Image: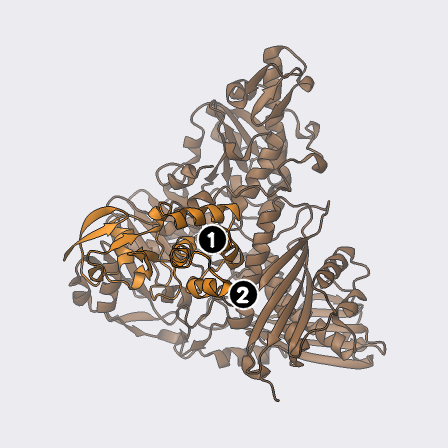
Chain colours: A orange, B brown
Amino acid sequence: MAFTLKVNGSSHEIDVDGDIPLLWVLRDVLGMTGTKFGCGQALCGACTVHIDGQPVRSCQTSVNSIGDSVVTTIEAIGHTPQGAALQKAWLDLEVVQCGYCQSGQIMSAAALLKDTPKPSDADIDSAMSGNVCRCGTYQRIRAAIKQAAGV
Amino acid sequence: MDGSILTNRIEGETAMSRRTFFQGTGLLLGFALTGARTEPVFAAPVSQVTENDVTGTFAPNGFIRINPTGAVTLVIPMIEMGQGVYTSLSMLLAEELEVKLDQIQVQHAPPNHALYVNSIIGIQNTGGSASVRAFWTPLRQAGAVGRNLLIAAAAKRWNVDPASCRAKDGVVFDASGSKHLSYGELARAAAELPVPPVKNVKLKDPKDFTLIGTRAKRVDSPIKVDGRALYGIDTRLPGMKVAAVAISPVLGGKAKTVNEKAALAVKGVRQVVNIDEAVAVVADHMGAAKKGLEAAAITWDDGPNGKVNNADIVKQLEEESKKPGVVARNEGDAGKALAEAAQRVDAIYQVPFLAHAAMEPMNCTVHLRKDRCDIWVGTQAPTITQSLVVELTGLPKDAIKIHNHLIGGGFGRRLEADGAVLAVKIAKHIDGPVKVIWSREEDIQHDMYRPYYLDRLSAGLDAAGKPVAWTHRIAGSSVMARYYPPYFKDGLDPDAVEAAAEPPYALPNIHVDFVRVEPPGVRTSWWRGVGPTHNVFVVESFMDELAHAAKQDPVAYRKGLLGHNPRALAVLSLAAEKAGWGSPLPARHGRGISVQFAYGSYTSQVAEVEVAADGSVKVKRIVCAIDCGMYVNPDTIEAQIQGGTLFGLTAALHGSITFKDGRVEQSNFDSYLPMRIDEVPVVETHLVRSSEAPGGVGETPTAVVSAAVANAIFAATGTRVRRLPVDSNSLKSSS
């Protein structure tokens, strides 16, 4: 089936089965590899993107469910105020280690700050506990979110 | 580095052969990590270096190129997998070469044992917390030689004494500071000068370091916050197909039935490859490949390992560990001392199989042609990968091109080349490049696991409670015997007994032995922290049992046995002090301590836990003191302590791989649980200033944390944890 997908401000014509997850369309069809595959079951958050500003796990989002909605990925999140502030905080506090999960971490954090500009620790726990980091960068992720939010 | 060197590497740097590296002009520095027969450092014009220069008499192991634009390229055999090695090694070079950190571009080294062997571990592997330790001296020497040559070239041009000139930020200045030439301008001339002997080149006094010891920014961070960083799984090539793979759920099994027709009916599926041990569905994209694999509805013939069960593996360990093993250490007469002791303590400890579960699932891209085989993968072991592919393809070594990548979490998993081997077997049936990606379930169920170990310990205490006898028998798989056979001598696996044969304490009568027991149907391998991760848990928990039997405070008891070991004593004391050891805690809260010497570093941790009435354990705080000798980047060390602690803590609280009917029972992050942000404690790091040689860091916290937590649980509940992961059912409050 043919779909028109709006990603990071551009429209893309794609021709795949409707039940194919957005993750693989982004990575393999559109060549945008910043969004990562981690678990395939919405258990780790590595594949988090925004659809109309809301965080979703792209590994469990079929391409035919998106319709006219707007997809934003890690490649463009720096164009939003929350994304830019988070990326800066991530660099200031040296959050990353292997870095593989960090696209998803930043996408989840950007969605958090959009809805909750001054998050509490409980807000951070609730928004970020779906994102796994095996390098164990959580302590710095929390600090970077707070720095970006100015709390 | 702005990251371009790392992001543009597919056709550039990782495809670079040694030959192409020598094209161009400028100054090339080679340096040796091992056994230099003549000079450990050489320098030459890039264009004039011949293969013989680098593989001949003194085999330099690393390369630094300074080209006429002033760009400094460092070819690093160690791979970046989060541990910060690109930054720390660049810092070593920049410090002595006198360039800014951002003037250095890092390239992954191609596989070449002669050139890039790690002197600590004897192979071109990234592991063993050995990178800084191996590079500490040679990389600084190479930098110093380079600086000397560049200064000499400037002095010659100005006709002044080189001693009157100085270098800073890649520029040489004369005495007045009015004349200056950049390294780029000097590179060609410097390459023509005689190389000063290394013994005549003075390294900086550590007190003069301006970069080493600072919180320099990681060179790989910018590309990791905006999606530019490319890992093996991000490989994209013209005409490339993507394959989803199902591996026999039982080791040694074979595919019995495969519905190829159904798989091929899925839109985008191009091919089904059945190699018995695994089935791959090849498609235009992974979405189609996964869908096709499901449609293939594969059934399996389990083969000989279909009856493997965890209980049987443990039973085998229990039986075999009753027999004497190969002696790792025997001092005094432990048997006699045990018999004569005033008090005797016995315990059996067990630790489970563990998966690595790195965030980047196993993957490998292969383009196999008649005369060459290109492999795009993130690997900790490029030379091993290359050798295995030579065996598989029959192609000469030079025809196997390994394009190494940033690794999305290694933890030891990428020391194994099974992922590349499987991908090449599949690629043999495919025309063109193919990227093989394992699902998370395949990744967890076909890992090569940290061995299950069973340990038997006995100790004798004198009337004052001091240990006068110590016996420790370790039973389990030997990773070393399979992986590094030369190091497995006379049945003894030095890794399996590391930190057990040589605990940091004064123990007068000690007997430690090892019984090798290989579980059927299970592949074992290296896991972050290797031998000490298991042994420090056992030794430090048992030491806590002895303190309890002696009715002494666990910190005071250890201090009494560490009088001869000032560095261990210092980290123990520091961790205890910073954690407020001895200050009162509420009921069912407790503190536990652990101390170790491993990977060349001394580490101690105090864990503070709360055990709820339902037995669930909340780790509230971890305080870590580490003496890793002279250190390169304290921020990276703190990051490694934070992360490595959580890696060990995750295993201690949640980690267990079990087998039933030959199959791994866990499959994804809902059954092999990672710690998440809402569960983790704050980890505090206290770094001891030291002038000793650098020690390793990356694995230290993983090894030290489990005993600290287990001992804290004992302090909180009175229940001793002798088996990991912690069983909350055993910790329920009786009141």
* A45 vs B300: above or below: above
Rendering coords of residue A50 (x, y %): 32, 56
Crowdedness near tag 2: few (<14), some (14–19) or many (≥20) residues, C-alpha within 10 Å? some
| Front residue (pair B665, B330) | B665
Residue B440 is marked as none
Gap in angstroms between the C-alphas marked 2 and 1:
21 Å
- Looking at the image, can residue B122 be seen? yes
Q: Quadrant of the C terminus of chain B?
A: bottom right
Crowdedness near tag 1: few (<14), some (14–19) or many (≥20) residues, C-alpha within 10 Å? some
- The residue depicted at 63 percent of the width and 33 percent of the height is B141
- Looking at the image, can residue B491 be seen? no
- The residue depicted at 65 percent of the width and 50 percent of the height is B695
Q: Residue under label 2, please give it.
A: B680
Q: Are marks 2 and 1 on the same chain?
A: no
| Front residue (pair B551, B43) | B551
| Front residue (pair B722, B433) | B722
- The residue depicted at 83 percent of the width and 81 percent of the height is B342
Type of amino acid at the residue the image marks with label 2: Val
Badge nearest the viewer, 2 or 1: 1
Rendering coords of residue B587 (x, y %): 66, 79
Tell me the SS state at disc 2: loop
In the rendered picture of this protein, how many numbered marks are placed on residues? 2
Q: Residue under label 1, please give it.
A: A149
Rendering coords of residue B520 (x, y %): 47, 73
Q: Residue furthest top?
A: B159
Rendered image quadrant of residue B454: bottom right
> Are circles 2 and 1 on residues that touch, CB within 8 Å?
no
Tell me the SS state at disc 1: helix
Rendering coords of residue B628 (x, y %): 67, 51
Q: Chain of mark 2?
A: B
Q: Is residue B508 left or right of residue A80?
A: right
